[in-house]
Image: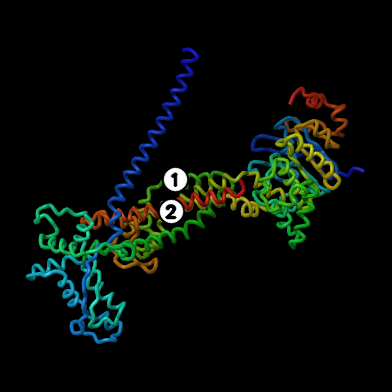
Amino acid sequence: MENVKIKSKNLNVYYGEKQALFDVNLDLNEKEVTALIGPSGCGKSTFIRCINRMNDVIDICKVSGNIEIDGVEINDKNLDVVSLRERVGMVFQKPNPFPKSIYDNISYGPKIHGKGETKSELDEIVENSLKKAALWEEVKDRLDEPGTGLSGGQQQRLCIARAISVNPEVILMDEPCSALDPIATAKIEELIDELKKTYTIVIVTHSMAQAVRVSQKTGFFHLGKLIEVGKTEKIFKNPDNKMTQDYITGRFG
Amino acid sequence: MTKEQRLKKRHNAEKRFRFYGLASIFFALLFVLILVHNIFSKGSSAFMKTAIKVEVYFDKDLLDLEPGASEEEILEADFFDITIESLLKVYPAKNLEEEDALIELFTTDAEIEIKKAFLNNKNLIDKKINLEITASDDIDQLHKGNYPRDIPEDRRRISNFQLEIYDALVENKTITKNFNNYFFKNGDSRDPEIAGIGGALVGSFYSILICLLLAFPVAVLASIYLEEFAPKNKITDFIEININNLAAVPSIVYGLLALQILLATIQLPRSTPLVAGITLALMTLPRIIIPCRASLKAVPPSIREGALAVGASKFQSVFHHVVPLALPGTLSGTIIGLAQALGETAPLILIGMVAFVVDIPSTPIDPSSSLPVQVYLWSESAERGFVEKTSATIMMLLSFLIVMNFLAVYLRQKFEKRWN
């Protein structure tokens, strides 16, 4: 049955004077893909950046309300963001591999968390992460080459492998395919399908088709408010809200 | 206006702009060439030194030394008499006046040169050797063709008799031109023929070393803190404005500050590379912080986010990822800052580095000169020998600056290329 992994309650986010999210209540199920759709600037990215407290980096950003992962409040000042981010990995819009070798890109996370004490353990983690990210076959002979030398799609899969390497429970994806061509996009989507067996995935996307293809649940945001959320099938076939209907049929956005 | 006319106007504007650009580059290059030519034509002869071959006889009685004399005895021994004896043998002089004129052809350090030769080979007692004794500044300049001989005798520094000797020496090839090791080895002197930049080189080296040791760590840590960790508020804005302003403060103000605080209040020894280094470090600090912060700022935020997202702490994301990427820019900024400090003259004059220092400093707390101050000192001297030495010192200073700037460019390119 469906287990709720992440639960947000009355989540409000402010950038200085400007409020970016209004009372968002959203449940995300374990080992499922949840897609967040909506026009630019509607707060979908802001929402997922709350789940791993990435908004902490932005000085003027203030978050109020609750987010629970497995029933534990994460919006707590005393919570260690380092261990939170170990549990909640993130993949960004633009591939951002470190300007280091492919191997170092993957082994960095495990190293700083003290996973993989020996070289052979690290080797194993790197190999497994790259295999899970469906990149192993393409790069196994050139692990010492720079990660920045790969193609865009490969770089994004490298970033996914990097996120996997610390063995998280949740992976957040912020428009992971927006900088990629259709073939690379297809590969990433295939990969997401595979990854949802192990991880809880939240993906922000601008492509309705992608949301339909990869997600089980979809949430529609507009102007910082969660307008509607439900099974992907239902949202795209028979939404309750007029605004959702208009957006998915391309009448605005 | 028709379409063709407008198009033509646009093309003309572009052509005019290209012409202005080319003309400016041409003028800039022209001035650089004039400068370089001027310095080279004046300075290159300073790297050669004129010497006169002299047969020296180490007479036992005149020296009052026994074979096997100890080093101390030799150092104490009087070489004046044999020096005069040897020098007078170069050309027949009829009277005391002519003898004086003959001795004047040689450097005042002739006695020391002979003593040094003897110290190198202590078995020379009662033996003859041929030595090349450095010529006086006047002969040196005459031999290099820098001194005119066709002006009346009473307005010439070299008498007719001396010219006669010089011509004879040229005739029988006893006058030579060698590499001028004194220029690099010796400290300053009142006599141009034996003056060198040795003391200034060592002084500049110590000053820059102290400047680097003080300014680099402080500047880099300050930049990292301000750029990566400090909250963005009014206080940090104020600090940033002040750093930018400090970089534009005239260097002489730092000299005044050092004079008041380091010399008058703390009573550090004046004219020393230690004080110079501290003063230059104060001056260089903001000039390193600015490029340092710029190169930290140039690291894309996505790298920081990538590191944070896998659970790196702020400290780890900065020191594992951002700082290594900013390092080439930081290093080249530092080197360019140091190059500016190397050429800085005004603050050093204020802290007393203009003092006439003959000895080469052995520690940073010995009185010393520095390269730019040496240029300043010599440029005020009347002797022709100092004119070429001034230009030669500028050549040395410029070559250090060029090497440092190339190093900065090289470091930046080498490390930035690695991943692209």
At a point 29% along the width and 63% down the height, the residue shown is B178
Categorize mark 1 by other alpha carbons within 10 Å: few (<14), some (14-19), many (20+): few
Q: Is residue B207 above or below residue A177?
A: below
Which corner quadrant holds the C terminus of chain B? Answer: top right
* Residue B275 place in picture, x, y as percent: 38, 61
In the current view of this chain or complex, which residue is farthest to the left? B95
Categorize mark 2 by other alpha carbons within 10 Å: few (<14), some (14-19), many (20+): few
At a point 38% along the width and 57% down the height, the residue shown is B258
In the current view of this chain or complex, which residue is farthest to the right? A1
Amino acid at dot 1: Asn
Q: Which quadrant would residue A188 be assigned to in this image? A: top right
Q: Report whether residue A78 is seen.
A: no
Would you name the residue on which mark 2 appears? B403
* Residue A124 place in picture, x, y as percent: 78, 57
Q: Is residue A141 left or right of residue B12?
A: right
Q: Which quadrant would residue B211 be assigned to in this image? A: bottom left
Q: Which sits earlier in the primary sequence, circle 1 or circle 2?
A: 1
Which numbered tag is attached to residue B245? 1
